[in-house]
Amino acid sequence: MSIAIEPQTNIQTDAHGMSFSSERNLDSTEQQAMWSQVTESVIKMGDINLAYSFIEHPKSQKAIVISNGRIESYLKYQELIFDLYRQGYSIFTLDHRGQGLSSRTTQNPQQGHIDRFETYINDFAHFIDMVVKPKNYHDLFLVAHSMGSTIGTLYMDKHPETFKAAAFSAPMYGIKLPVGSRFIHWLAQLLDTTDSNKEPDYVLGGSDYKDVKFAKNDLTHCQLRYENYKKLYQQHPELQVGSPTNRWLHESIDAGERAILAAQQSPVPILILQADEDTVVDNLAQSRAVGGLCQLINIPHARHEVFMEKDESRNFAIDALLKFLASHQS
C-alpha cells in the first residue's frame, strides 16, 4: 500500500520527546563526544580493504546496519548515527568498495566503478557475517540510502532471515536518465571497455569529483548541511569520487529492476522514504516496488538526500523511520 502523509509543523522530537539534531547545531559537542566512542576498522575481501565503523549502545539489544549510497562514506552519516544512537540503537555501517575509506578498484580513484553489482552484495554479506552477526543482537534492522538500498534489497532477497525490517531513503530502484533506460543500458554496454582488458571509462560527460555550488545542487534544500558535507570532502580528499563508469551504469540499471521485484515480494517489511523532489533516482520505480510488505511514505519538500534535508523534512522522515522500526521490534 502506498501511504502519503503530510508533515506536521515544526517536528523537533520523536514519540518519546527526545529532540533530533538540528541544522543550526551541526558537529555539536554531543555529536563529537559520541563519535569519540565509535570504533573504526577494516575487513579484507581478497585484496580489497572494506572500511567500517560501529558504536554499541550499552543499554539495548537492538541494532541498525546502515548501507550508504554511491560516493558516500560512513563519515558523512555522523549526524544520523548520533540521532539513531540516542534512540537506543547500536549502529554498524560499511563503506562499499570503490568509495569512502574502502579500497579503490581502478587506477583513477575518482571513478565510481564496480565489476558486477553482485560484488557489492557479497561484500555486504561478508560484513554482516564477520562483524554484525557475532554480536547477537535480538532485533536487527537495516537503514539504507539510494544505491545502498538497492544493495540492501538484493541482500535481503538472498538472506531474508537477517533483518526484522528495513527503511530505505530514496532507494535507487531506477535512475533519472535523459532518455529511456533501455537505450542508456545499451549505450553503456557498448561503451564499456572493461572486458577489453582496458581501464574502465566514465559515462558520457563524466568526470572526476567536482565541487558543486549549493545553488546548483540537486541533493538538498539545506545549505547548512550541504556546506558541512562539502567541508568533509574537502578535509578528507581521499573520500572524493566522481562520475560512474559505463560498467557501473549498466550493472546498476539491471540491479534496480531486480530490486523492484525483490521489494514487491520481500518477506521482510520495507518502508520507502520517497523524496518528493528527487531528480537523481526515479520515484516511479519506487512506486512500482510497493506491494505486499513494502510500503511508501512521500517526504514533501525533500530532494534526494532526505537525511541531509532541512529540519522539517528530515525530522519528519526520521520520525516515520523510528515508528516503523519500533512497530517491528520483538
Image (cartoon, grey):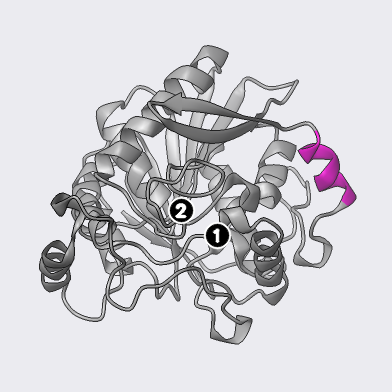
Q: Is residue 213 above or below residue 7?
A: below
**Image spot of residue 71 (x, y percent):** 48, 56
Q: Amino acid at mark 1?
A: Gln
**Which residue: 64% across, 48% down?**
75
Residue occupied by mark 2: 69
**Residue 206 among magenta residues:** no
**Image spot of residue 138 (x, y percent):** 54, 17
Left or right relative to 182: residue 96: right
Q: Main secondary structure of the magenta part?
A: helix
Q: Please say if the residues under marks 1 and 2 sit with CB atoms less than 8 Å apart.
A: no
User: Residue 176, which numbered label?
Assistant: none
Residue range highlighted in magenta:
29-36
* Mark 1 and mark 2: Cα distance apart in space: 13 Å
Residue occupied by mark 1: 240
**Which residue: 20% across, 59% down?**
250
Q: Is residue 5 above or below residue 155?
A: below
Query: Which circle, 1 or 2, is nearer the viewer?
Result: 1
Q: Secondary structure at mark 1?
A: loop
Q: Earlier in the sequence, mark 1 or mark 2?
A: 2
Give whichever of 243, 170 is nearer the camera. Answer: 243
Left or right relative to 139: residue 298: left
Left or right relative to 218: residue 26: right
